[in-house]
């Protein structure tokens, strides 16, 4: 397609005016013939201008109108320019759509706003975490919608090198981390992440180390005191040695039990997935635990009832299930008073194999129940230490059961007693499925 040049325009005018010039010379009316030719030329140009105007403003057709002479390259040039602009708009639309789809897929809330603070765009997660509404909040100042004083000061300082933590306006129990970065000229991008779980885990980590240190410090202090006293030869030969020896043995046993439970919990947590293809003889396990519970009860005069379906065996991890079941039984013995009744039941429920450990103890207040599986959490710290409790038993139960697709259920009423129970999936019943089938289902 040829473009329009001045040479073509001059050649076109010469070809148009030459016949009129010859006629004017022959007939002797040259000015009139040139005037008529000019009017015809102007009329032709006006006609093509109207065609172009109608095509650009009224006609929806993409095809340009037919033209001749100098107007044909103009029509075709505008048509090519329109095609180029349509391609660019299509590419830009595709790019914007990809950006928005990518922003929607991010685990963070994303807000784009101008340097003066007016919102340009936000993804769906920003609407959930920050309470923004799209497109209703388009163009609204972000400081009017996020009214946290810390955020307003952070935005006004224009120093975005470090992130900012604020409380979620939608849920005061959630903590949000904001990062603002320059996006394009005159615009900023704000990424918001919910860090509540990270904060909780960090708090749990600090509490964990503090609690371990505290639990180990007491027996170590006792041992250190008696060992210093043992430097006196008279003490080694005196009547206090028997008592000191008994206390040191008790404190060493307490430290050993704590370390064993820490190792057990660490081992369970270190194996997020396990192969559930080992047959676990739960009835035989409960038979042993019954004898151990009676021995542990010793002079507390507690009564025990074990109601066990001896044919009900399951597939799972023997060590983890033993840790879970033994902790529930031992807790019932340790944390219930004298003359309490403890009932252990292992049976086949409609939803799967179920274990229930029920006691007639003092019960647990409702505000404590949801925290019982936290590490080192105790309802009565002084009483738990007297009974040798470390606060790790139910945490071990929780993690061991999670590896078997089960969870701990706790029902309790003050002054009436408590029931700790769990239900394993039906597919883990050993007499109905083969081990490799269960492994395939679990994976």
Image (cartoon, rainbow, N blue to C red):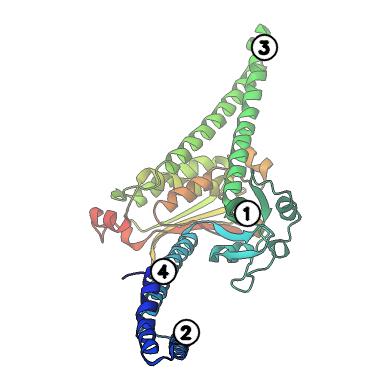
- The residue pinned by badge 2 equals 49
Mark 1 or mark 2: which is in front? Answer: 2
Q: Residue at x 73, y 64 (%)?
A: 144
Q: Position of residue 279 (x, y in %)?
A: 29, 49
Judge left or right: residue 215 versus residue 323: right
Q: Residue at x 40, y 73 (%)?
A: 10
Residue at image mark 3: 235
Splitting the image into 4 quarters, where does residue 80 fall? bottom left
Q: Are the residues tagged 2 and 4 within 8 Å (C-beta)? A: no
Residue 415 seen in the figure: no
Question: Cα distance, mark 4 to mark 3?
Answer: 122 Å
Q: Is residue 84 above or below residue 32?
A: above
List x then y, in percent, for residue 342. 53, 54
Question: Residue 416 versus residue 399: which sits nearer the camera?
Answer: 399
Q: Secondary structure at mark 3?
A: helix
Identify the image quadrant of residue 77.
bottom left
Residue 331's mark?
none
Give the Cα separation between the discs numbered 1 and 2: 61 Å
Tell which circle, 3 or 2, labels the residue nearer the N-terminal end.
Answer: 2
Q: Earlier in the sequence, mark 3 or mark 1?
A: 1
On residue 176, the disc is 1
Mark 3 or 1: in front is 1
Image spot of residue 92 (x, y percent) = 45, 65
Task: Report how far apart the C-alphas of labels 2 and 4 lie in the structure.
Answer: 19 Å
Q: Residue 165 in the image: x percent, y percent?
A: 66, 50
The crowd level at tag 1 (other Cα within 10 Å; few <14, some 14-19, many 20+) is some
Say which residue label 4 marks.
Answer: 6
């Amino acid at each position: 397609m040829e473009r329009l040049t001045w040479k073509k325009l001059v050649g076109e005018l010469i070809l148009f005016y030459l016949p009129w010039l010859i006629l004017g010379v022959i007939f002797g009316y040259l000015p009139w013939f040139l005037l008529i030719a000019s009017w015809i030329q102007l009329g032709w140009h006006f006609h093509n201008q109207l065609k172009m105007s109608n095509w650009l403003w009224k006609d929806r057709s993409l095809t340009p109108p037919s033209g001749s002479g100098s107007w044909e390259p103009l029509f075709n040039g505008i048509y090519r320019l329109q095609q180029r602009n349509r391609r660019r708009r299509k590419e830009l639309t595709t790019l914007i759509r990809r950006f928005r789809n990518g922003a929607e897929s991010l685990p963070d809330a994303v807000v784009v706003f101008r340097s003066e603070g007016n919102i340009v765009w936000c993804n769906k997660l920003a609407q959930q975490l920050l309470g923004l509404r799209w497109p209703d909040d388009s163009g609204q100042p972000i400081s009017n919608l996020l009214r946290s004083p810390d955020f307003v000061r952070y935005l006004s300082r224009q120093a975005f090198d470090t992130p900012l933590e604020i409380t979620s306006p939608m849920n005061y129990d959630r903590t949000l981390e904001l990062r603002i970065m320059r996006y394009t000229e005159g615009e900023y991008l704000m990424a918001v992440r919910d860090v509540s779980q990270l904060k909780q885990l960090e708090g749990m980590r600090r509490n964990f180390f503090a609690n371990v240190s505290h639990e180990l410090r007491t027996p170590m202090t006792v041992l250190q005191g008696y060992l210093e006293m043992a430097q006196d030869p008279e003490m080694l030969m005196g009547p206090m040695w028997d008592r000191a020896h008994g206390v040191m043995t008790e404190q060493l046993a307490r430290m050993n039990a704590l370390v064993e439970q820490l190792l057990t919990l660490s081992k369970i947590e270190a194996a997020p997935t396990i192969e559930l293809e080992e047959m676990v003889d739960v009835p035989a396990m409960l038979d042993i635990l019954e004898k151990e519970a009676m021995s542990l009860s010793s002079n507390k005069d507690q009564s025990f009832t074990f109601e066990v379906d001896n044919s009900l065996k399951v597939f799972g991890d023997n060590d983890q299930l033993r840790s879970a079941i033994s902790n529930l039984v031992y807790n019932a013995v340790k944390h219930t008073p004298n003359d309490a009744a403890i009932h252990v039941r292992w049976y086949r429920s409609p939803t799967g194999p179920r274990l229930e450990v029920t006691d007639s103890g003092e019960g647990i207040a409702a505000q404590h129940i949801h925290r019982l599986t936290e590490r080192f959490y105790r309802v009565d710290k002084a009483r738990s230490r007297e009974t040798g409790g470390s606060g790790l038993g139910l945490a071990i139960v929780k993690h061991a059961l999670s590896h078997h697709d089960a969870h701990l259920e706790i029902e309790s009423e003050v002054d009436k007693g408590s029931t700790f129970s769990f239900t394993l999936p039906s597919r883990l019943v050993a007499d109905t499925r083969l081990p490799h089938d269960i492994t395939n289902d679990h994976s």
